[in-house]
Image (tube, rainbow, N blue to C red):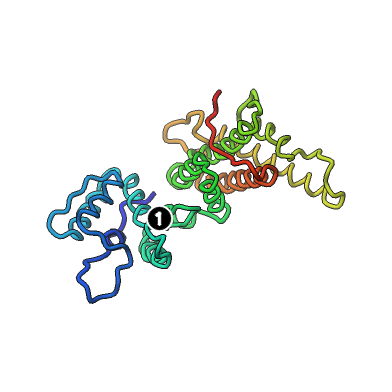
Amino acid sequence: MPFPLSPQAIDALADIITGGPGLGGGPPPIGLYRSGPQIEKFMRACNVAFSVSGSRVPSLVSCLIEINNGYEAEKVLPRIIEAAADPRDFTNDPPRHVAVLDHLNRVLRYDGFELQQQGLKVRLVVAGHATPVVEQLSGMAETISFDTVQRDLDRAIASIETDPEDAITAACSTIEGVCRSILIELGEPLPAKKDVQGLFNAVKGPLGLSPDRSDLDPLIAGDVRTTLGGLATVIQGVGALRTHAGDAHGRERGYARVDARIGRLSIHAASTVALFLIETWQRKFPTRILHRHDDPA
């Protein structure tokens, strides 16, 4: 992610966290007004040690500038920005939450970022890198408590520009995580070969995705089989990219096999497949919740 942020972004973030100077007589704050102790509590929740020294707004701005210029800005600042726009703080005033997102995004986009509502959370992403299918998958991961998908998506999106090989690895992991959870939830054994293609082949039967199924309308049977065959080809391609271009099996120092375009292609393809598998699960087993499951093997 492109850090440090601009001074304008730091000032906007401070305005949202503090609620402005709070002198009265002016327009209501865009963010939530927080007293000095409340700001300290907010920052502690973001794992940042902070104490107000003098005026609360300048104190926070100084702290944010120090973080912005530090070596861990890319780890700490996203956490603070997402916390400042946490929807849970605006449950009684949704329009204010919309205003907060608009206010922050107006300046963040100049720095190459944007805040996006994904399910029940707000995520800081590189501007333009999330597509509707990625956002929908992320939102669904929230509603079914499937946090491994969210972590893999976050990792993939964050790595597109700086490390597309890692983005490919994380994208493939999203499909593998969904397949493993479906098999374990159904009490099915994991396949001997636990790569993405082996896992997908194992879930096709339980989910009714085998191309040779005979219960289809004759008018669309051929089209459905072609589409399912294409889905298998996409999965095979993502898995092959992970093997040959991802970082799961090591790589030479200073050598990049792919660029950001291929990283994005892998994320979009993997997100489409993972979303389809989850929706198929929900349609076939509407009363069962798909939980996160770690691979026991």
Residue found farthest to the bottom: 25
Residue 231 placement (x, y as % from top left):
69, 43
Secondary element at image label 1:
helix
- Is 124 above or below relative to 106? above
Expressed as whole percent of the image width and height from the top left, the position of residue 275 reads 61, 47
Report the amino acid beneath label 1: Arg
Quarter location, residue 235 = top right
Q: Residue at x 77, y 45 (%)?
A: 226
Of residues 261 and 177, the one drawn nearer to the viewer in this rendering: 177
Which residue corresponds to mark 1?
88
Q: Residues within 10 Å of mark 1 (few under 14, many from 20)?
A: few
x 22%, y 73%: residue? 24
* Residue 155 placement (x, y as % from top left): 46, 42
Q: Name above or below for residue 91 compared with residue 154.
A: below
Horizontal placement of 82 versus 263: left or right?
left
Task: Tell which residue pokes out farthest to the left in this image.
Answer: 54
Is 121 on the left-hand or right-hand side of 233?
A: left
